[in-house]
Image (cartoon, rainbow, N blue to C red):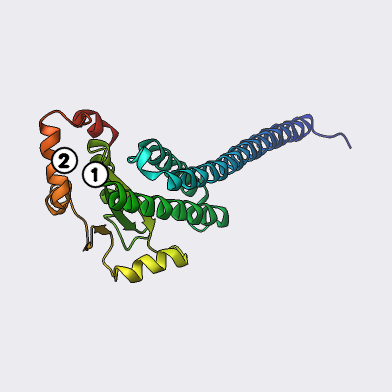
Amino acid sequence: MIQNPKKQFNYRKHLFVFLITLIVFGFGFGLSDYISQKKLSELNNLREDLQLDILSSETQFSILETAICKDVNHSSLASELYAIGERTAYMEEALGHENPQVIRLKKNYSLLEIKNWLLTEKAKDQCQAKLIPILYFYSNHESCPTCAKQGYVLTYLREKYPFLRIYSFDYNLDLSALDTIKSLYRLTDPLPILVIGENTYSGFRDKEEIENILPEIFKNLIEEEGNGQIESVDESSLEKEK
């Protein structure tokens, strides 16, 4: 029996298409796996860099505690702390809130912030430093839809007024030191929560509200800024960042 040439042609055509499709999909999966591995490698390098930065900052805290009034504002350390916070947030966004590595990094960073906060309070008491710390408690859960907005407001104020120190904490992070702070200030919902001086403020606050509830030292510094004694940041550039 002679095979129909048309059927033979169709068979070869389908086989050819199948092989091409297999090659394309194989290349696609291989490329996807390569990109994923590269991204994972970059994140691992970032994690290691963050751990070194945290260790370096802890060492700086120890040095400053021995001569705290010699660098009363320790602004460079505060800037470094904020940079670590931004990279930690990037890790969290890339790997997810529940990733074990992210949780460990957030715990280490939170402890670093607490140490910086205690150092700031010590500088205020012992050196009459004109610094104002604000503790900011947020949540990444859907239960706090205004937390991200509150973060933008605080970033704006921190950039505008160099004497502000903003310390951001995940309210749901399982960390005993944070539990102690929450118990000390009797923090309760709703989030976000701000601690300014001895007072706590629950719920979203815009920049005007925060400026109005800041203590008297803030108002004094605002007046000095108006006299050109304190350098402020151009508001238009900050709006672009937002």
**Residue 68, x across and y down, in percent:** 39, 44
Q: Residue at x 44, y 44 (%)?
A: 64
**Residue 226, x across and y down, in percent:** 10, 32
**Residue 122, x across and y down, in percent:** 34, 52
In which quadrant of the rendered image does the C terminus lie?
top left
* 78 or 108, nearer to the observer: 78
Q: Amino acid at mark 2?
A: Leu
Q: Residues within 10 Å of mark 2 (few under 14, many from 20)?
A: some
Q: Residue at x 33, y 58 (%)?
A: 137
Q: Does residue 2 appear in this view?
A: yes
* 121 or 1, nearer to the observer: 121
**Residue 216 vs residue 50: left or right?**
left
Report the Cα–Cα distance between label 1 and label 2. Answer: 8 Å
- Earlier sequence position, callout 1 versus callout 2: 1
Give the structural element (helix, strand or loop) at label 2.
helix
* 30 or 178, nearer to the observer: 178
Q: Amino acid at mark 1?
A: Lys
**Residue 129, x across and y down, in percent:** 27, 45
List the residue tagged with mark 1: 130
List the residue tagged with mark 2: 221
Q: Residue at x 25, y 47 (%)?
A: 128
Asked if marks 1 and 2 touch (Cβ < 8 Å), the reply is yes
In which quadrant of the rendered image does the N terminus lie?
top right
